[in-house]
Amino acid sequence: APFDTVIHGGTIVTAAESFRGDIALKDGRIAAIAESIAGGERRIDAGGRLVMPGGIEAHCHIAQESSSGVMSADDYYTGSVSAAFGGNSCFVPFAAQHRGQSIADVLATYDGRAAPNSVLDYSYHLIVSDPTPTVLHEELPRAFARGITSFKVFMTYDLMNVGDAGLLDILTVAKAHGALTMVHAENNDMVKWMNRRLADAGLTAPKYHAVSRPELAEEEAIHRAVSLAKLVDAPLFVVHVSTRGGAAIVARERDAGTRLFAETCPQYLAFTRADLDRPGMEGAKYICSPPLRDGETQAALWGHVARGTFDSVSSDHAPYRFDAGGKFLNGADAPYPKIANGMPGIAARLPYLFSEGVVAGRIDLQQFAALSAGNAARIFGLSSKGSLMPGHDADIAIWDPEERRVVTLEDQHDAMDYTPFDGMTLTGWPVTVLSRGAVVVHEGRLEAARGQGRFVARQPSGTGRMRGHRAPEFEALRAEGHEIAP
Ligand code: URP
Ligand code: ZN
Ligand code: ZN
Ligand code: ZN
């Protein structure tokens, strides 16, 4: 047969339009898109369904130790399976350098975790916590050369943050190679100052987590990160924007042409800080950083999603179980600063965004395709993924836009013992997911083989928005003949 698989009778969703048609797949790629295609060793009926680019999950923590040493509950098998059940064909977890580790060792460790286990194609964003000269000038270029074209830094957490000078150094190296710097922006000293006062007053229940990390801490840090990026004229991606002020800075800078990208996450759209005040220690399930905000912020963030301030809506899946091996590594009644940070949601991200975004009328299908896959592919250099075009990888998610279902823990298919989305009724669910032509999930059943996913070497990242190029301060001095390091 000329084609391996034909998906027929569905409504095909591209970045530009939606139309009835068939898609033929061959050797892992999209071979043809036409009104009607005959043949195919396997024919998948998509009547009444949407045929969309498979989701790309660009922010998730899989088989990753937190800075305090807790291992995430999901490994590359359960993490990728859960992602697939949530409509994703590809994911980009973090490979995290902790202080003193060489990047080569970090990447070898993550290769060992991912390659034998992932059912989806994957890459890593490299977390840099120790930007020594060797790391900056030898190890980051080597990581870039093997297709890891985004580096993430923290402005918060004592054990991870690199300081402003470290951020400038990483931005500079990233710019020189065509890599994109991602930043977790919260003012570390503000948070520590708040923590000390709350501790002195004996206020340590989960709900004080939100008090300890005020909106101002994020807004200030986003402004500072953007300023540092502009100083060296490097592109920047702000992860998990959770505040009105932060989103406003992003919107304003993008209008001005700054090469700035940003995401928000479903938890900031779906939950509020009131969830941290659930009975007993239940609030710990909602501890993530930055923290959940209030209803007004939620509404403002949805407005920014609809207006295009955000390039993607990512899960920030950070799975720590509601037990001593996860959230409560420091005891069942630990004060909030000693409870593991993070919420799970890799399977819920896209059903939530579809239901509350598309079905609720806040965004259209083209925006959904961009926010779920297309923009991440473009920004992070996944050039063969993220859109349905002949020649592209056959990364496809088939959705039933009318299925109405209550979220349960079981259908997350992850290694967690809770889902914050439990009991929510959502309309529109992925039913079949393919990654590079292989059916991973079909009609709600797993078909994939462990380890079938491949590492994807990425193209340069962050090169999409070149408007508003800003002359760095050093240019004039270099023009006068001074030698200043790039
Ligand atoms: O609370 C969160 N988001 N935990 C994961 C680590 C991070 O900050 O990205
Ligand atoms: Zn057909
Ligand atoms: Zn973060
Ligand atoms: Zn994260």
Image (cartoon, helix red, strand yellow):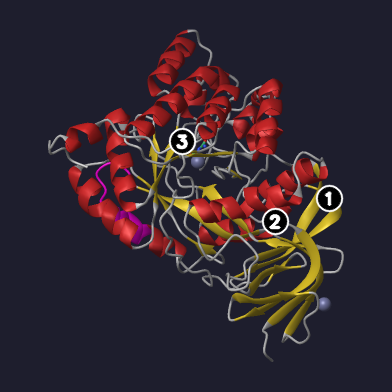
Q: Residues within 10 Å of mark 1 (few under 14, many from 20)?
A: few
Where 66 sits versus 413, above or below?
A: above
Give the residue displayed 55% in from the left and 51% down from the top.
376
**Res. 109 image quadrant:** bottom left
Q: Earlier in the sequence, mark 1 or mark 3?
A: 3
Q: Is residue 390 magenta?
A: no
Could you tell me residue 270's position as x and y percent?
70, 34
In space, the residues marked 1 and 2 are separated at their CA atoms by 29 Å
Amino acid at the residue labelled 1: Arg
Q: Which stretch appears magenta? A: 98-109
The answer to whether residue 208 is visible is yes
Q: Earlier in the sequence, mark 1 or mark 2?
A: 2
Q: Residues within 10 Å of mark 3 (few under 14, many from 20)?
A: many
Query: In this rendering, would 207 be left or right of 354?
Result: left
Query: In this rendering, would 133 be left or right of 215?
Result: left
Residue sitting nearer the eye, 446 or 239: 239
Which residue in the protein does label 1 denote?
405
Q: Secondary structure at mark 3?
A: loop
Which residue in the protein does label 3 denote?
258
Asked if labels 2 and 3 touch by Cβ distance under 8 angstroms, the answer is no
Q: Quadrant of the C terminus?
A: top left
Name the disc covering residue 16, or none: 2
Amino acid at the residue labelled 3: Thr
Give the residue displayed 60% in from the left and 24% down from the top.
244
In space, the residues marked 3 and 2 are separated at their CA atoms by 25 Å
Q: Secondary structure at mark 2?
A: loop
| Residue positioned most to the front | 480
Q: Quadrant of the N terminus?
A: bottom right
Asked if labels 2 and 1 touch by Cβ distance under 8 angstroms, the answer is no
**Res. 362 image quadrant:** top right
In space, the residues marked 1 and 3 are separated at their CA atoms by 41 Å
